[in-house]
Amino acid sequence: MGLISIILITLLVKGQSEEQACKLIGQTGYLEFSKDGDLIIGGIFSLNSSRAIDNYGYHAYPALFCRRLNPRELLFARAVIFTVEEINTNSALLDGVTLGYRLYNGCGTESLVRAALEAVTEGESCRKRVQALIGHSSSGVSKAINLIVGELDIPHISHLSTCACLSDKRIYPTFFRTVPSDQFQISALVQLMKHFGWQWVGIIHSAEVYASDGVAEFIKQGKAEGICVEYVIYYKRTDTKIEHKVTEQLKASTSSVVLLYMSLTYTRELFKNVDGNKLPRKQWIGSEAWISQRDLASLGSKNVLHGAMGFALPQSIIPGLSEFLLSLKLSDEPESVMIKAFWESFFDCSFSSSNTTKLCSGDEDLRTISSAYTNTELRSVRNVYTAVYSIAHALNALLQCENGFNPTTGKHCVNKTDVQPKQVLEHLKLVDFTVLNGHKVSFDENGDNAAQYDLLNWQYKEQESVNVINIGHYDSSLPEGQRFRFTPNITIVWALNSTEPPKSVCRDACPAGSRKAVNKQAPVCCFDCFKCPEGGISNETDSTECFLCTAEFWPNEKKDKCIPKPTEFLSFTEIMGTVLTAFCCVGVFLSILIFIIFLVHKETPIVRANNSELSFLLLLSLKLCFLCSLTFIGRPSDWSCMLRHTAFGITFVLCISCVLGKTIVVLMAFRATLPGSNVMKWFGPTQQRLSVLAFTLIQVVICILWLTINPPFPNRNVQSFKDKVVLECALGSPIGFWAVLGYIGLLALLCFILAFLARKLPDSFNEAKFITFSMVIFCAVWIAFIPAYVSSPGKFTVAVEIFAILASTFGLLTCIFVPKCYVIIFKPEQNSKKHIKSKMQSKEI
């Protein structure tokens, strides 16, 4: 019925003239405190906090009556009276103009709206109606009131209605407030949770506009900051299973933080209905409505509220207010029925004779009792004080006159008897003044004042006392990064009795070296973490992407940064390089040793019979072959890359040329023993030298062309291995490389064929047999080298090449010279002309 009445009244008022609207609405009798003045301020307060129905049966209609006195609302009403009196004694403000007030009482939305209607329609033709209205404490009631007074252009200032919805000027065009909008409180709560890293929270809220709208805004803003809600418990007064519901939900939850967003009345009821000793320890975050109320600790909620944290309106002491409130006597308001009712409630007495209670004298001292009325440090009372001053400053600016015009608006001056609410509304939008310890008051385009909050922390002591400590401050007028700050050197008590803030996340942050992926089956805070793929890194927590390292870099073990890839090449210091170097040295030593043996025994038949000149040249070339393999070991450089392949190609051609010369000499010597043969004169020592020189010069020409056109060069190979850089010698021109190898192979093949043809010649010329063996080994090694070289990775490519050089060189050295050294050293009797002639004679027989 209440809502229907409001709608009907609004529709009837809308579109009517002021006089018609006044006659239509009339008076309803809710006036409680009043004082006449040149200009009137109205106020709406719930001195009774609830109502009931008297049912007279069929004898009469049911009647509504108010009950349950609300001392806090009486404090607000008396604060208006105090502020009006203070302004009237202040000559600097509204000089020559007195303020009056009419303060109304109501309980329930419908009676409060009717009280507001009475306030704005008082007197004949509305001429004595209020110029502005203060109230109400409830956002729901303020919404209903402003739907009415907004049609009459009457400014409406609330001291405690925090719903963000009231900032919508399209619906509530004349609404202002001196209490911060819940929009600011929600922003502060979100920033608080973001500061401590609380991303996974639970919410308990009540069934009221203040709570439901606030929670919806918190979920919206929290989602933008990465805060997720695990659960929402909706508290209704009629819910008989609320204790079981809250207890089971908190026990089953994984979040450590609970946001309790309720008005003070609902919070009291919740803690009465829920046994705090049964609840698990959580970090409770409170809304502004209840977080500063120490008396909640007496409701068995110590286990719940220890370490609780939340934002509250700033503490301000209004000079003289405490004395004014506590000096109240019944004689100050002799006509007020409500004061008598409060007095009886405060002192547990009665003004009528009663056998159960003592009689009230009316002279009792309010300083001797404890009540919400006597709590003159109530944080929200500053908002009432500021609201009255805001109206006074607007009226003062409106009544200014210079040369017939208002200096603020440039319009014609207004006399105090002609002030209209719409004019007050225009000037209220422009007020800008400072009051109470430098608190600055002005309204933005939404009718909101800059938000300031104290951050409070509940701290229980061993003596069972509770302290609510101010540990920080929030100011929305400051730049975004500076709005929230902690008080220095203040100890914060946490709900879990730890020295650090509790952790409340659905999933720990993905560490550097991994990436965050959304889990579509869970809230956004319950994401998945995956290790970065091979070659990828992430250098910050909760990274959504992994980045690939550049070609010469590779992730470290944690995959949180790119580090230079280690370089790899065949060095002298590693085991494989050392072993190959040792074999090279052994080969050089054997070459020198055999050279010395042959040099010492150069006049013996076995040395002379095997072409000593070519043998010495072959030993020299073999020694060079062993030495050139050393150029393949160590860090590649421009000179080493060019030297290793060309030296290898030239020395091997020199070596094969000598072997080929020896093979041809064997064949020619055998042909020379035939009757009438004169071939040796065509392949004597000079021809042998020229043949070796010619074969070698061809390879030299090939190498010169290779080095001139596209020589080998040092290269950093980043493709063969993902995690390291191979330092190698690039071939430059592959054609040059394979031309060098191909020419060596061609000479080796020719040498093998000739040696194979001479393998069965008489024993005194049996060197061809050993040359054949050596060429078989040589060709086998280099045929196997080709696939091994192509398929070997990194430094093993170089190792294969060195191995091929050493194997083929050792093959030549062993097959050609070791049998001769064996005869020279161990069978000297066979190294004589007599032995050779005897063998030849045995062959002839």
Image (tube, helix red, strand yellow):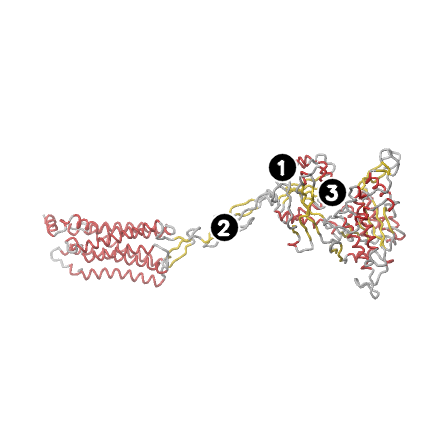
Mark 1 or mark 3: whose residue is earlier in sequence: 1
The disc placed on residue 536 is 2
Whether the residues at callouts 2 and 3 have beta carbons within 8 Å, the answer is no
Q: Comparing marks 2 and 3, which lies closer to the viewer?
A: 3
Q: SS for tag 1?
A: helix
Amino acid at circle 1: Ala
The disc placed on residue 445 is none
Amino acid at circle 2: Gly
Is residue 42 placed above or below 686 in the rendered structure?
A: above
Residue 297 in the image: x percent, y percent? Answer: 71, 40
Q: Mark 3 sits on what residue?
A: 264
Quadrant for the N terminus, please.
top right
Whether the residues at callouts 1 and 3 have beta carbons within 8 Å, the answer is no
- Which quadrant of the figure has residue 276? top right
- Which quadrant of the figure has residue 604? bottom left
Mark 1 or mark 2: whose residue is earlier in sequence: 1
Instruction: Measure the alpha-carbon separation of dots 2 and 3.
Output: 54 Å
Q: Comparing marks 1 and 2, which lies closer to the viewer?
A: 1
Q: Mark 1 sits on what residue?
A: 252
